[in-house]
Image: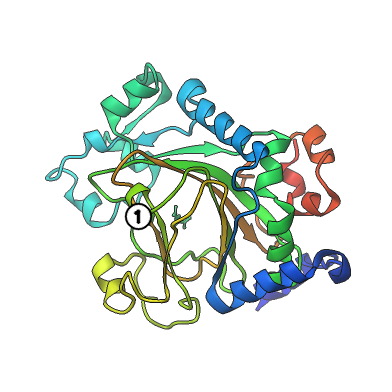
Amino acid sequence: MIKNFIEILSRFGRGFQKSKYEDEETLKNVQHLKDRGFVALNHLVGSPKFLEIKNKINSSIEKDLTIEFPCLAQSKINSDKHQDLIKSNFLSTNANLSQRGLTFEKKDIKSYSHMIKEFSPSTLTLGIKDDKLFFDVWLDEKVINIVQSYMGFVPELVEAYARRNFPCKYKVMNHFWHRDENHKDYLLKAFIFFTDCDQNTGAHHYISGSVNDENFKDNKYYEDEEIHSIWPEHSKNHMISNVKAGTIIIEDTRGLHKAGTPNIKYRDLGYAVFLPPNFLRKKKPLYTISKFNYENLSENQKLYVPPSNVK
Ligand SMILES: O=C(O)CCC(=O)C(=O)O
């Protein structure tokens, strides 16, 4: 009750001018998002700006190795010794995984190829770069117009990062079906596909209409068999992302979803997480932007960046 009241107060002044930001296309996309729980946009497919970011992501991951550490090494997992972690889908902290000897650090790697060969990571995470090009995609104007119109106020961009997923022996956390629980009423994620994606290269899966479905709310994670018993892969509401690089899917991730694991190559995905502002949220900022880049954002984009993230 008090929490709700504080949130409503935190939203004060975060309305937006409908006549300016809600054009016909936005309203059509918002309706799709309301009806189906997701909407896919393809205006960035093939754009030079997008290709430039994709190249920067490749070089950050493969050359500069500016990924987040510690990182889980699938090569260190032992099916007997780590049975408890396998059973709990590796829902754990980095500190615990490190203590169990299952992670590697930057100092342990000589190069990208050495890292892949030696440690077989299932996922590498790269924080958003303090670069206007990146913020223009994570806060793409078409995306934020849809997000604010869906929520009815301007939320905040609370998380902004990219992940590279590889084929892996052991599935880890969001490889299993789950619902995001960051907020009971308002939660949207934009998934930005940096590689072409289909079932072989690690599709994203979503169950359309599951936000308000009362099934599968008791556990943190569910297996394919459980979900497929109600929504088989070919069924109308089982959405599988067969998409080109440049596609952005905006999704209400309170609904059931999972990251498909690639059988070949890898897939790169950007993540933008939108939540209502709450001035009691005390978390350390999960990304930062310089004052200079912040000043160059549009007036609407600026509203999405919490002041404590501007450095
Ligand atoms: O990477 C994906 O396809 C899904 C990620 C996910 O499950 C999440 O962000 O909650």
Identify the residue at horizontal 73%, vertical 36% (top origin): 132
Identify the residue at horizontal 69%, vertical 73% (top origin): 28
Q: Give the residue pinned by disc 1.
A: 199
Q: Nearer the viewer, residue 280 or 124?
A: 124
Query: Does 237 sit above or below residue 248?
Result: below
Identify the residue at horizontal 36%, vertical 66% (top origin): 220
The local crowd at label 1, few if under 14, some if 14 to 19, many if 20 or more residues have their Cα within 10 Å, is: some
Secondary structure under the numbered disc 1 in the rendered image:
helix
- Residue 225 location, quadrant: bottom left
Judged left or right of residue 36, residue 97 is left
Position in image of residue 242 (x %, y %):
44, 57
User: Which of the four quarters of the rendered structure image does ligand 1 lie in?
Assistant: bottom left
Residue found at the very far left of the displayed protein:
80
Residue found at the very far front of the displayed protein:
46
Look at the image and tell me in which quarter the C terminus lies: top right
For the image, the number of numbered tags is 1
Look at the image and tell me in which quarter the N terminus lies: bottom right
Query: Does 69 sit above or below residue 153?
Result: above
Judged left or right of residue 80, residue 307 is right
Position in image of residue 130 (x %, y %):
68, 34
Q: Nearer the viewer, residue 3 or 195?
A: 195
Residue found at the very far top of the displayed protein:
110
Q: Is mark 1 within 8 Å of ligand 1?
A: no
